[in-house]
């Protein structure tokens, strides 16, 4: 497909990612992006920009998480950061400016990074404005003041596919970091130009990977046709699949950046940066490689495990103590089924790897049946599980014979049917034995015992 080279553009991205924090950036309001939250629930004079309200010291957790994101992107972290006011007039911004660590005179949190081959020009922290509905005129301040990180790449991409592929890797790595709320989605501004043909066009605020890909393809094609000579800002209309002109591009000075006298500078010492660097989780591709090479897991199962950092780290701890192949289905099938069934995640349930190991060891050593093991798992099994009397596997022939006779006596018709050649009745009687023993009967032994009982 080399003939398509001519269609390639120069594409750069500005990605907005929401940070996970309990509170907003400059006030104590709850930072919630919960969908369907009643408008203007988490608000105060600071985040609604009431006259005279002054910001509190910036949320320390937000600053730390922004630094972690910068480190993950391979950026150089700057030690002295100065808050700026970025001015613009819009109904979502009552104080008339947004507080940001970006801008003409600002030092970004991180710069000169590289992530999967793409240069990160800079990344910084800023507050989200409110949300304004132009149809109703209503402004909802729940979002106002939430911390977000903006990541700016060099125009290193040439095609929509490259962009999508890279964004998926970015989202995966951010989810590993747990610093970014990837469930809250991302907002991406895409800059597109076709070298030698058109000026740079910025497409604002696209929020799905599919729309990003479609917008880039449409824009490259349009610029090649129209040979646009003017910088402009457009938006993507997903219904028509087209980009629409919003305005001629503002230059940076239109925002009248100025350092904010209400906010102190942030000083990040080198020691803190080193500590954070050490505590970064391994990247998804490193985890995948480890699963395949160290634990000898096939690629399909490795990618299931590597999807979530909690699951892969849990598996690593388990597989360091017990054969990885034996442990694999207990994690990829049983544990994931259990979490899906309860619509929860590993960090929200009380399952300690040590206890999980103890449980599957009991199954491995034949002390309990796999069925019993699953049942215990389903009950959020107790912290230190040892099978006590009444919970272990029943392998005693005499005990099982008693159960089998009892079952046969209670189900005389099924027993007669089996003797008349109805094999299905045997499975039914086995089911009754498992029921009567609360799934504790050793399946093989119980089968033999039942056969014997039925012959008599
Ligand atoms: Zn507030």
Image (cartoon, rainbow, N blue to C red):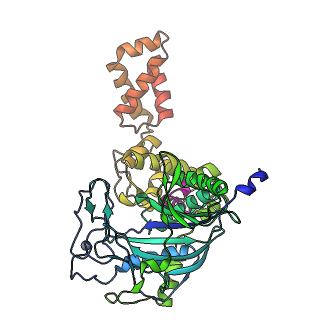
Q: Which residue lies furthest to the right in this view?
A: 2
Q: Which of 312 and 17 is in front in this view?
A: 17
Query: Where does residue 205 sit, x and y in percent of width and height?
Result: 46, 61
Judged from the image, the quadrant occupied by ligand 1 is bottom left
Q: Which residue lies furthest to the top in this view?
A: 420
| Residue 327 visible in the shown view | no
- Snapshot quadrant of residue 428: top left
Query: Where does residue 46 sit, x and y in percent of width and height?
Result: 25, 76
Q: Is residue 67 magenta?
A: no
Q: Which residue is drawn at 33% across and 44% down?
A: 390
56 sits left or right of 74 in the view = left
Give the magenta-colored segment's residue range: 305-321
Q: Which residue is drawn at 47% across and 46% down?
A: 334
Q: Which residue is drawn at 54% across and 72% down?
A: 152
Q: Is residue 357 above or below residue 72?
A: above
- Report the label total: 0
| Residue 388 visible in the shown view | yes
Q: Is residue 358 above or below residue 73?
A: above
395 sits left or right of 228 in the view = left
Q: Nearer the viewer, residue 295 or 406?
A: 295
- Snapshot quadrant of residue 169: bottom right
Query: Where does residue 179 sit, x and y in percent of width and height?
Result: 44, 69
Query: Where does residue 393 sit, x and y in percent of width and height?
Result: 42, 42
Q: Is residue 272 above or below residue 206?
A: below
Q: Does the magenta stretch include residue 308?
A: yes
Q: Nearer the viewer, residue 338 or 322?
A: 338
Q: Quadrant of the C terminus?
A: top left
- Snapshot quadrant of residue 185: bottom left
Give the main secondary structure of the magenta stretch: helix
């Amino acid at each position: 497909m080399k003939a398509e080279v001519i269609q390639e553009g120069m594409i750069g991205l500005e990605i907005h990612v929401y940070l996970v924090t309990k509170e907003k950036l400059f006030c104590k309001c709850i930072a919630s992006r919960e969908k369907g939250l009643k408008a203007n629930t988490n608000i105060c004079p600071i985040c609604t920009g009431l006259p005279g309200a002054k910001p509190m010291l910036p949320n320390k957790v937000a600053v730390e998480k922004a630094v972690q994101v910068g480190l993950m992107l391979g950026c150089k972290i700057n030690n002295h950061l100065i808050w700026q006011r970025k001015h613009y007039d819009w109904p979502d911004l009552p104080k008339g400016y947004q507080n940001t660590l970006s801008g003409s005179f600002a030092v970004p949190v991180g710069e000169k990074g590289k992530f999967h081959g793409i240069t990160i020009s800079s990344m910084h922290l800023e507050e989200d404005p409110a949300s304004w509905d132009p149809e109703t005129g209503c402004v909802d301040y729940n979002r106002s003041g939430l911390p977000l990180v903006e990541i700016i790449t060099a125009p290193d991409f040439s095609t929509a596919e490259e962009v999508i592929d890279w964004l998926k890797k970015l989202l995966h790595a951010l989810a590993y970091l747990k610093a970014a709320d990837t469930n809250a989605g991302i907002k991406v501004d895409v800059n597109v130009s076709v070298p030698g043909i058109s000026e740079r066009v910025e497409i604002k605020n696209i929020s799905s990977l599919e729309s990003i890909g479609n917008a880039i393809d449409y824009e490259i094609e349009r610029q090649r046709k129209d040979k646009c000579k003017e910088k402009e800002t457009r938006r993507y209309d997903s219904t028509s699949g087209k980009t629409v002109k919003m305005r001629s591009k503002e230059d940076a000075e239109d925002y009248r950046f100025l350092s904010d006298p209400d906010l102190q500078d942030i000083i990040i010492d080198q020691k803190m940066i080193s500590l954070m660097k050490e505590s970064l989780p391994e990247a998804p591709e490193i985890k995948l490689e480890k699963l395949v090479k160290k634990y000898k897991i096939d690629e399909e199962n490795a990618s299931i495990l590597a999807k979530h950092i909690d699951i892969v780290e849990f598996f690593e701890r388990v597989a360091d103590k017990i054969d990885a192949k034996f442990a694999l289905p207990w994690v990829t099938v049983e544990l994931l089924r259990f979490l899906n069934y309860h619509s929860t995640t590993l960090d929200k349930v009380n399952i300690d790897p040590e206890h999980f190991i103890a449980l599957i060891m009991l199954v491995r050593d034949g002390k309990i049946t796999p069925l019993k093991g699953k049942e215990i798992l389903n009950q959020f099994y107790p912290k230190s599980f040892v099978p006590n009397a009444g919970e272990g596997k029943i392998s005693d022939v005499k005990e099982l014979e008693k159960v089998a006779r009892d079952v046969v006596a209670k189900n005389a018709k099924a027993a007669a049917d089996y003797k008349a050649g109805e094999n299905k009745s045997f499975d039914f009687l086995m089911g009754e034995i498992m029921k009567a023993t609360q799934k504790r009967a050793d399946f093989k032994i119980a089968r033999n015992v039942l056969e014997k009982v039925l012959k008599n």
